[in-house]
Amino acid sequence: MKSPASESPPAAVPAPDLPASHPPNQPGLLELFVAFAKMSLAGFGGVLVWARRGIVDQHRWMTAEEFNETFALCHFLPGPNIVNLSVVFGSRFRGVAGGIAAFAGLVGPPMVIATILAALYARYGEIDALRRILAGVSCAAVGLLMAVVFKMMMPLIKKRDLVGLVILLAVFIAIGVLRLPLQTVLLVAVPLSLGITYFLRQRVAA
Amino acid sequence: MNSDGNPISTLVWTFGLMSLFAVGGANSAIPEMHRIAVDVHHWMNDKQFADIFAISQLSPGPNVLIVTLIGYSVAGVAGALAATLAMCGPTAVLAYYVSRLLQRSSQSRWPAIIQAALVPLSIGLMGASGLILALTSDLSWVAGLITAAAAVLAFATRLNPVWILLAGGALGFAGVI
């Protein structure tokens, strides 16, 4: 997105190599990195809530509507949604460098923490107390995941979206019970689901 | 598969490909991660996979960092870095180009259709993740009860999830499981 030329100086934007064409609410590279690092480190069990808080409420870099649109885009693309969001968001303000800065902020610091935890686990993972704690945490973590699944199912149930629920169940059985490879299942399920959705919408529109 | 080859290139290839198939985010890809790490390459057993999932939920940051932990257990720090970049890179590049494309034609109705079509798939995948993880970690009825209680609490209240995880850890430490 090309930002409109503005007379105001780029206050608090530490990017002296750029012309003074960014209004104050356009984040610089360092700002992008720091903001995404903060959101990421605050985000236990999901970064999305903190990303919304940081981008919309705190920094006012996007309106709530712009944020929802950007997130919807990142949600239908494959891969980790919030990682996609950081790249799309950063590049919208500062091009490729902005995308990399936001991505590095989001993934870098927590990756260091995860690596340290992995090293500790490799070294001390067999200690009995730690084994018991991790067993308890993983039970709770599975419960959290199930709660997310139920929350996401609610709109489908409320809409009585029978087709959606059948596709959901078919994928659940293929992957969870039959343990088929992901690629195989998706190569069948994605075109099928797209075709059905498109066909149904055509009929509604007609 | 080529589990006797260079572990780093196996990680990059595995997660780079998975990145482009992970519809609905990292939690939807857990069954595939489990299948590859436990069944195909024998990088770890069921119990270790459940532990790694627990650690990834306990540590801050995006859920995708479970691949950092898998990468570390395969090939140390280099493996952690390789797995993380491979899982995030391809889809990040794709997201960059698609978002630029859509900015030019933002009135297209295809994004809405694609999203509507993919939502049931990603929920089904996450449900499968829940089932596979439950089978690996809920080995007793008390463990199953803790999972059920955590699910109900997270569904019905706005409690910060980290407290639910810590409560589970405390119960585990107390030896009830």
Image: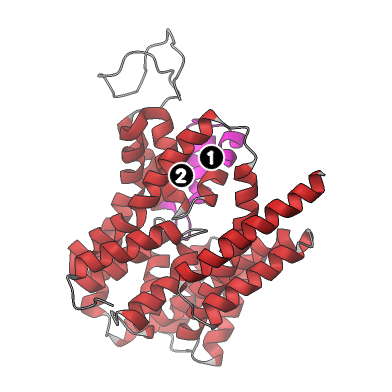
Between disc 1 and disc 2, whose residue precedes? 1
Colour mapping used in the image: secondary structure
Q: Is residue A47 above or below residue A132?
A: above
Question: In the figure, is residue B49 to the left or right of A47?
Answer: left
Name the residue type under label 1.
Thr
Q: Quadrant of the C terminus of chain A?
A: top right
Point 50% across, 47% down: residue: A74
Question: In the figure, is residue B73 to the left or right of B63?
Answer: left
> What is the total number of numbered labels drawn onto the structure image?
2
Residue B90's x, y, as percent?
35, 51
Name the residue type under label 2.
Leu
Label 1 to label 2: alpha-carbon separation: 7 Å
Residue B74's x, y, as percent?
23, 73
The residue pinned by badge 1 equals A70
Q: Is residue A9 above or below residue B152?
A: above
The residue pinned by badge 2 equals A85
Q: Is residue B172 above or below residue A17?
A: below
Q: Do labels 1 and 2 touch, CB within 8 Å? A: yes
Q: Chain of mark 1?
A: A
How many other residues sit within 10 Å of disc 1, few (<14), some (14-19) or many (≥20)? some
Q: Which residues are magenta?
A: A42-70
Label 1 residue SS: helix
Point 19% across, 78% down: residue: B4
